[in-house]
Amino acid sequence: MSLELIGGRILAPYFGSGIYVWGSIITIFMVSLSLGYLSGGRLSVKDPTFAKFGAIFIIGGALLAPITLLANPVMDFIFLRVEDPRYGSLVASTFLFAIPTIILGMISPYSVRLLVEKVEQSGSVAGTLYFFSTLGSALGTLLTSFYFVLWFEVNSIILVLTSSLICLGVFSLYLNASSRSKFLGDNE
């Protein structure tokens, strides 16, 4: 949600902050997340590991970082070629946010797969995960919209998001290595 709100700040100097800009941003995020959910669910079926889970975080973070460098040149390019702000904001949102958001959308279904040990508990695990995920999104929305955008530059916020994702990915790789060590130690 933080990235979505930041998207509004990135597009506003070029296309304004009207309903069509927010409609473009929300649409691209929703479509991208849905594609990420589908991909993450499919990926989680084949030998799910914390290493793959961590890789999703790291790739997502790595794809966010270029937004800090590409936003202005991309916005200049699109703004000069697409006169209608409705379609310009849609094209810009797609170019800047679709791929990172698809990758980030893969996290939730992959998390469910890692946490479910028995089929009977899948509903409870998914419900609990989505509860905390939505609560985190609400908190991120409030913090970003009420404070972060007032205290920090957009690029700084994006770099913090990037760093957080990469740190979570590295932590997942650590979990994978420690669970593998424990498994190997138990079998010796």
Image (tube, rainbow, N blue to C red):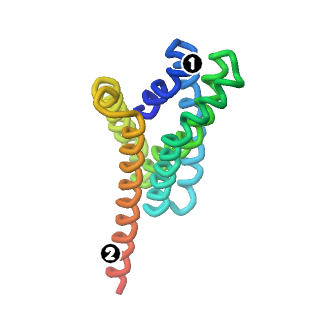
User: Circle 2: is it few (<14), some (14-19), or many (20+) Cα within 10 Å?
Assistant: few
Residue 13, position as x, y percentages in the image: 51, 21
User: Circle 1: is it few (<14), some (14-19), or many (20+) Cα within 10 Å?
Assistant: many
Disc 1 designates what residue?
Answer: 15
Residue at the extreme right of the image, as rendered: 81
Disc 2 designates what residue?
Answer: 182
Instruction: Give the residue displayed 62% in from the left and 32% down from the top.
Output: 94
110 is higher (above) or lower (below) than 31: below
Give the camera-side residue of 171 and 24.
Answer: 24
Residue type, label 1: Phe
Residue 150, position as x, y percentages in the image: 30, 26
Residue 12, position as x, y percentages in the image: 50, 21
In the rendered structure, the answer to whether residue 130 lies left or right of residue 87 reads left
Q: Which dot, 2 or 1, sits closer to the camera?
A: 1
Residue at the extreme top of the image, as rendered: 18
Badge 2 marks a residue whose secondary structure is helix
Indicate the quadrant where residue 6 lies. top left
* Residue 154 seen in this snapshot: yes
Instruction: Give the residue displayed 36% in from the left and 82% down from the top.
Output: 187
Mark sitting on residue 81: none
Between discs 2 and 1, the one toward the N terminus: 1
